[in-house]
Image (cartoon, helix red, strand yellow):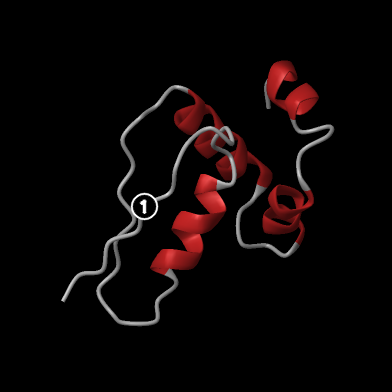
Amino acid sequence: MCAPVTARLAAPSSRRVRVVRNGALDIAMASTLWLLVEKKASLVVAAGPRMAGKTTALTAIMDFAPPRYTRIYTRGV
């Protein structure tokens, strides 16, 4: 784990901390996703079955985005 990420995780919003505490993401994955979101990387959240947690995962990832970003969810058929 790199020091800047540890410093950044010192005071995140409670929802970001909960994603790690409840085991949905480990600290390494959460840190990686946070950096990817900050660098405006393209991310795709996909899974085959319905109710697999795609929207939940996307919402958790988007919690790392700056507040100035707008969330737009599309629904597939």
Q: Name the residue that disc number 1 marks.
A: 72
**Residue 9 percent coordinates (x, y):** 76, 33
Q: Quadrant of the C terminus?
A: bottom left
**Residue 17 percent coordinates (x, y):** 76, 50
Answer with left or right where residue 38 lies relative to residue 44. right
Answer with left or right where residue 74 lies relative to residue 7. left
Give above or below for 16 relative to 41: below
Q: Residue at x 50, y 66 (%)?
A: 56
Q: How many numbered marks appear? A: 1
Give above or below for 11 relative to 7: below
Q: Residue at x 77, y 58 (%)?
A: 21
Residue 41's image quarter? top left
Give above or below for 5 relative to 71: above
Residue 52's image quarter? bottom left
Q: Residue at x 30, y 68 (%)?
A: 47
**Residue 11 percent coordinates (x, y):** 83, 34
The residue lying furthest to the left in this view is: 77
Answer with left or right where residue 19 lies relative to residue 77. right
Q: Secondary structure at mark 1?
A: loop
Query: What kind of residue is marked 1?
Result: Ile
The residue lying furthest to the right in this view is: 10
Residue nearest the viewer, comparing 39 with 74: 74
Q: Quadrant of the N terminus?
A: top right
The residue lying furthest to the bottom in this view is: 50
- Disc 1 packing (10 Å; few <14; some 14–19; many ≥20): few
Residue nearest the viewer, comparing 32 with 62: 62
Q: Residue at x 58, y 39 (%)?
A: 64
